[in-house]
Amino acid sequence: MTMKLDRRQFLLGTTALAAAAGISPAFAQQALRLIFWGSQARADRTYGVTDLYTKAGGPAIEGEFLAWNDYWPKLATQTAGGSAPDIIQMDYRYIVEYAKRSAIAPLDEFVGGALNVADFDQDQLDGGKVDGKLYGISLGANSVALMVNTADFEKAGVELPGPNTTYADLTSIGEAFKSKGVGKAVIADGSVSEPMYENWLRQRGKALYTADGKVAFDEADATEWYKLWADLRAAGVCVSPDDQALDTGPLETTMITLGKAAVIPSNSNQLVAFQAINKDKITISNFPRIATDAPGGHYRKPSMFFSIAGFSAAKEEAAKFLSFFVNDQEASKVLGVERGIPCSKAVRDALAPTLDEQSQIALNFVANLGPLLGALPPSPPAAAGEIDASLFRTLGQEVGFGAKSPEQAGPELVKGATDILNRAA
């Protein structure tokens, strides 16, 4: 999914005409290029802000957006070819890799000048740092969360998932779904969800990676994870592997939107987007717990960043746009909490009274995780994205289709992840 070509052509054409005719000093400036992943709803909000920025005197922004699965291969190709856009939406999983390759630029020289982060939450600033330098401006704080179809739980006559819902409870919920003829699984196949695995590990006092970039779980952890989901799959609590394979990344192909499952793992900031494409009321809850007295596995994560390309010839202009995007109160009204809770206290305070019901739910969820909330883990090592995309998800699918047993996949995950990290070191 990409931006409509007619808009892109319009921006390019009007910028050139304006420059030639001297109609508008702002428009005559060279356009900045922006790339991001997300849904049409995110694109609409993003372009609403770029239009505000241009009207305020900034240069035009030539934007492009793609679905998550298509985004990273395209960005990698552009980066390798030296043609990456000036402004790059960046994920916590990839920021170390891109920073260490100088594919994105340190922003410290702009702080206090073109880039205002004076009242940013410190944890969100820290999340954008690599080796002590600031490489990403958090666009919002969020947390992993379950998207829940409330109509399905109402039909089954069971309470919505909450802080005390455990993985064991999913089985009894599944029995209620069957007896009341809900006609779908309780939950998507979480075995292929790295955030769900990380949350489960954190509840066991473990982690995905150590602070020095090593694998922090062992074969027994991974094997038990795959066994947990094999049992849920066999009981019909989670979707079949054939159904799960339909999920190719866009929100439209997720199990909740396709009507295959009542619950999916996601992020709190995506509630607004999911509600926009689902007829039934969607709400959010925390991930299941391994036991009601287990430590919380959640943390407040920078939902995503804006970074500036290392080869950009307009770094200061790009920094000014970043500052506008995260500080302007009119921009914040356009963006809402679709990318998470604003990191600027002034923006957050101004925005809160204007939010609709779904946005208030997302804000309150992140603000009230209580004992489920733990510390932000260290930035994932370079190649963490490769481990997720090419190893973790593949092994989960192979177990789902019966090509491998949990006892085979567990050790393969540890060895494969270790090999990838060693190769990237």
Image (cartoon, rainbow, N blue to C red):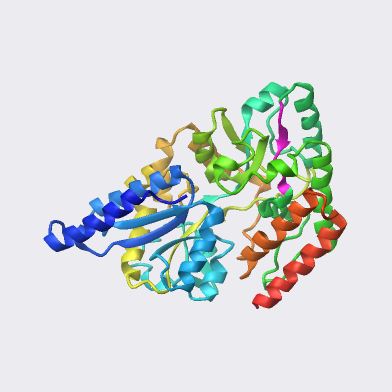
Q: At x 40% / y 55%, what residue is drawn?
A: 64
Q: At x 57% / y 27%, what residue is drawn?
A: 280
Judge whether 176 appears above or below 35 on screen: above
Percent position of residue 111, x then y: 38, 68
Q: Is residue 285 visible?
A: yes
- Furthest residue to the right? 407
Q: At x 67% / y 71%, what residue is drawn?
A: 213
Percent position of residue 292, x then y: 78, 42
Q: Is residue 187 magenta?
A: yes
Q: Residues in magenta? A: 183-190
Nearest the eye: 65 or 108: 65
Judge whether 404 appears above or below 81 on screen: above
Asked whether, in this view, residue 319 is left or right of residue 304, the answer is left
Judge whether 5 appears above or below 257 on screen: below
* Numbered marks: total: 0
Percent position of residue 346, x then y: 39, 49
Asked whether, in this view, residue 142 is left or right of residue 172, the answer is left
Q: Is residue 288 visible?
A: no
Quarter of the picture containing the C terminus is bottom right
Where residue 182 sits, quadrant-wise, is top right
Percent position of residue 224, x then y: 84, 53
Asked whether, in this view, residue 22 is left or right of residue 355, the answer is left
Nearest the eye: 136 or 348: 136
Asked whether, in this view, residue 138 is left or right of residue 324, the answer is right
Nearest the eye: 177 or 157: 177
Nearest the eye: 390 or 144: 390
Q: Is residue 12 magenta?
A: no
